[in-house]
Amino acid sequence: QVQLVESGGGLVQAGGSLRLSCAASGRTFMLNAMGWFRQAPGKEREFVARLEWSGGITYYADSVKGRFTISRDNAKNTVYLQMNSLKPEDTAVYYCAARTILTIKYDYWGQGTQVTVSS
C-alpha cells in the first residue's frame, strides 16, 4: 500500500503562485510515476501533470504548460507542483496520484487540496 498526503493549497490572486506538495509513504519502492489531477465544481477530473521515474520525463496538460512545473525530491518521497501565473480557471481541488510497477493506472490517490484563484 502507498499513502499520499497533499498540502499547499489555498487562496491566491490571479497572477500569483502556489506550490503543492505530495508526500508518499508506505511501499514507495513500487512507484514508477506520480501525477497531479484537478477537479473543478461541476466538471470531470482532469489530468494536470505527470512525472515518470524512468528518465524523469514530465508531461503537462496544454492548459498549464509553461506555467506549472512538476518535480520530485527523492530523499523525501515527495512530489511538488509549482504553479505560477495562476488564473481563475485553475480553481479546483487538486489531487496527487501514484502509479506502481504493477499497473498502468493510478492506484493511489491523495485526499485533495483546494486551490482558489481570485480575479
Image (cartoon, rainbow, N blue to C red):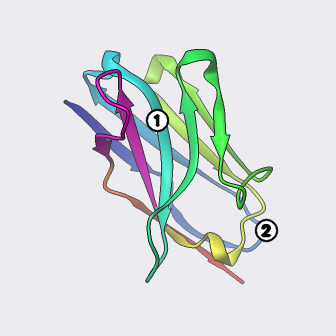
Above or below, comparing residue 55 to residue 114 in the picture: above
| Residue 73 found in image quarter | top right
The verdict on residue 36 being magenta is no
| Quarter occupied by the C terminus | bottom right
Give the residue displayed 65% in from the left and 40% down from the top: 59
Q: Is residue 91 above or below residue 110?
A: below
Instruction: Give the camera-side residue of 68 and 55.
Output: 55
Which residue appears farthest toward the front when viewing the image?
104
Residue 52 location, x and y as percent? 54, 27
Q: Residue at x 76, y 53 (%)?
A: 67
Neighbours of disc 2 within 10 Å: few (<14), some (14-19), many (20+)? some
Q: Residue furthest left?
A: 1
Marks 2 and 1 sit apart, C-alpha to C-alpha, by 26 Å
Q: Secondary structure at mark 2?
A: loop
Q: Amino acid at mark 1?
A: Met
Q: Is residue 85 left or right of residue 50?
A: right
| Front in this rendered view, residue 14 or 61 | 61
Disc marking residue 15: 2
The residue sitting at 49% across, 42% down in the picture is: 35
Instruction: Please give the residue where the numbered disc 1 appears in the rendered image.
Output: 34
Q: Nearer the viewer, residue 19 or 4?
A: 4
- Residue 36 image position (x, y, % from top left): 50, 48
Q: What quarter of the picture does the N terminus occupy?
A: top left
| Disc 1 element | strand
Q: What's under tag 2, amino acid-wise?
A: Gly
- Looking at the rendered image, the disc whose residue lies closer to the viewer, 2 or 1, is 1
Residue range (magenta)? 93-109
Crowd band around label 1 with a 10 angstrom C-alpha radius: few (<14), some (14–19), many (20+): many
**In the image, residue 84 lies at what x, y percent?**
74, 56
| Lower sequence index among marks 2 and 1 | 2
